[in-house]
Image (cartoon, rainbow, N blue to C red):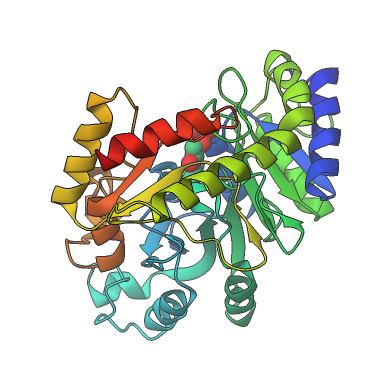
Amino acid sequence: ILGPEVTELENRLSKFAKVKHAVTCSSGTDALLIALMAKGVGPGDAIFTTPFSYFATAEVIALLGATPIFVDIDISTFNIDPVALKSAILALNENDISNKSLPNWSLKKLRGLNPKGIITVDLFGLPADHDRINAIADEHDLFVLEDAAQGFGGEVNGSCAGTLAEVGCTSFFPAKPLGCYGDGGALFTNDDDLASLFRSIRVHGRGVNKYENVRLGVTGRLDELQAAVLIPKLSIFPDELKSRQRVAASYQRLISSSNLDVITPKVPDGYLSSWAQYSLLASDQVERQKILSKLKKAGVPTMIYYSKPLHLQKALSYLGYKVGDFPFSEQVSERIFSIPMHPYLDENDISVIVEAMVH
Ligand SMILES: *Cc1c(COP(=O)(O)O)cnc(C)c1O
């Protein structure tokens, strides 16, 4: 645990991502938790985030006793909408309860919330619009944490996903673009003080030695075996990312020249997706089911990320959100589905998959 392979991996990760510090840890979720703990997030703090993500993004906020405040997505990128973000921040500052982003709480309870930060998510591998989000955060004195669990490997104008905000987190869960053989994760920052906090919190808030504890922390270490798996995988990661671009381009070409009534993912200018998932939008829930049945019959595995947006999850029902609060997230959850995406799909596999959807 935390031996030479881990150190070697951290050096290689910081070089790859062009960032001063890469601190590995036990999972993507723990990376998010460690980042929020380092930022001193706790009860009374409000953290703005997207309801269209994996549960962990909001879970870590709630685990620390802080309050997730959801902001709807931009339907063309599936990422948090900067315009809606700005109005949610203003609504909280002004206690404007007509804004659906605010929890359905009493005015008194809402007044107890202190806006503290934003967690962006690079959904399906496409980085969120950090240029606009970081500017909004600066204006309102909020920190930004980039959840790059899916985005790692992506870029915006040459800057790597995971380094597009003050702190970035990623996951090495096997299904992510850079996966290990179990659980693992990492944090990225250019801030020396934050990096040393991450290293301390990762091991029970250790001080100068292991048996001196200067703050509360977690069991957040990455073990040597996972680091040893990740080192050679990181060295072929650039080639794998190129191959993912090829697969995405082939899907795009074949799907758009077919008569399929689905919307293919758009990558804005200057952005590079890591293509953690290749997700299509069907025209509605019924059409989605028809396509999924055809794929199933042809033996093609599919997934729905995500069939229930976070504001409607039972575990977060205390926030009082209801159906209709985030229409784009809800609509997308009914129409989206993902088809196979990995660097080793060849042109024949790709055409078999597209054919299966057509017929
Ligand atoms: C996978 C994922 C996580 C959690 O990562 P784990 O390593 O599974 O803990 C967090 N956020 C997003 C967006 C993810 O996709």
Residue 43 at x, y = what percent?
Answer: 44, 56
Looking at the image, which residue is at 85% across and 26% down?
Answer: 8
Looking at the image, which residue is at 67% across and 24% down?
Answer: 222
> Is residue 321 rendered to the left or right of residue 140?
left
Front residue of this view, candidates 291 and 224: 291
Relative to 314, say whether 81 is above or below: below
Quadrant in the picture for residue 178: top right
Front residue of this view, candidates 220 and 172: 172
Residue 34 at x, y = what percent?
Answer: 61, 42
Query: Does residue 11 appear anywhere in the picture?
Result: yes
Looking at the image, which residue is at 81% across and 45% down?
Answer: 21
Looking at the image, which residue is at 44% across and 42% down?
Answer: 56
Quadrant in the picture for residue 294: top left
Given the current orientation, which residue lies at the most extreme left position? 286
Query: Does residue 211 appear anywhere in the picture?
Result: no
Residue 352 at x, y = what percent?
Answer: 39, 31
Rendered-image quadrant of the N terminus: top right
Rendered-image quadrant of the C terminus: top left
Front residue of this view, candidates 183 and 177: 177
